[in-house]
Amino acid sequence: TLLISGGLMKTIIQSYSQSKCRKTSLEFYIDIHAHSTMMNGFMYGNIFEDEERFQRQSIFPKLLCQNAEDFSYTSTSFNRDAVKAGTGRRFLGGLLDHTSYCYTLEVSFYSYIIGGTTAAVPYTEEAYMKLGRNVARTFLDYYRLNPLVERITVPMPRLRKETPPPYKHPSLRGSASNVPISKGDKKSSLNHKDPSTPF
């Protein structure tokens, strides 16, 4: 396991952003933290003068809310508090160009509430891992790769023609839907502090 300090990460990204020979762009930076008072998972994002950039920044958390029952878009907020100017998302949000999106992903130490219910569900190791998988799934949705993944992982039926048998088979067709079901938003505690750590 390689652990990189915040200061070193800052230096690496600064060097990368100033490189003139880079062939790829850094599109997402997500700083992950555990939250000690609020429930569910939620995000902090930045505010920009460019309205279009600000609107594009809200797409990823909205998609994540559709994929993860324990993520709350209503608890997600966008700010530029001066006290958080040194945090990763604030610093890099000002350093990187308009194609980059920087967030802090907060996840409760304790529990989450599923939309439409009032009972708190304790977080487990598996629940945290599931949220991680849902973040990855959200990247697939964001880049519209889900159809490609389905073609790779789902066996395709054979297309060769076969001679029908002399008797009739009952239809074995079933119905299925690939349309995602929105799980709605979840309620959280009113205490809305941003504990993002500075670099």
Image (cartoon, rainbow, N blue to C red):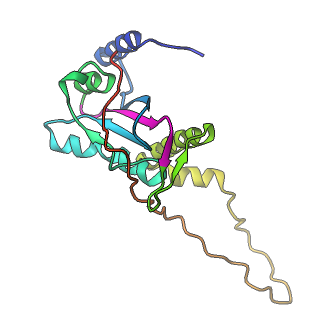
Exactly how many numbered labels are in the figure? 0
Q: Does 101 lie within the magenta span? A: yes
Q: Position of residue 73 (x, y in %)?
A: 35, 49
Question: In front here: 145 or 157?
Answer: 145
- The answer to whether residue 21 is above or below residue 76 is above
Give the left or right position of residue 52, taking residue 125 as reference: left
- The answer to whether residue 166 is above or below residue 47 is below
Residue at x 68% of width, y 78% of height = 173
Query: Which residues lie in the magenta part?
Result: 98-112
Residue at x 32% of width, y 50% of height = 74
Q: Main secondary structure of the magenta part?
A: strand
Give the left or right position of residue 25, taking residue 67 as reference: left
Q: Residue furthest right?
A: 166
Q: Residue furthest bottom?
A: 167
Question: In front here: 18 or 129?
Answer: 129
- The answer to whether residue 103 is above or below residue 140 is above
- The answer to whether residue 174 is above or below residue 103 is below
Q: Position of residue 71 (x, y in %)?
A: 44, 47
Q: Position of residue 1 (x, y in %)?
A: 60, 16
Q: Position of residue 126 (x, y in %)?
A: 62, 40
Question: In front here: 199 or 16?
Answer: 199
Question: In front here: 139 or 198?
Answer: 198
Q: Does 182 lie within the magenta span? A: no
Quarter of the picture containing the C terminus is: top left
Give the left or right position of residue 31, taking residue 51 as reference: right
Residue at x 49% of width, y 65% of height = 179
Q: Quadrant of residue 100?
A: top left
Give the left or right position of residue 113, taking residue 14 as reference: right
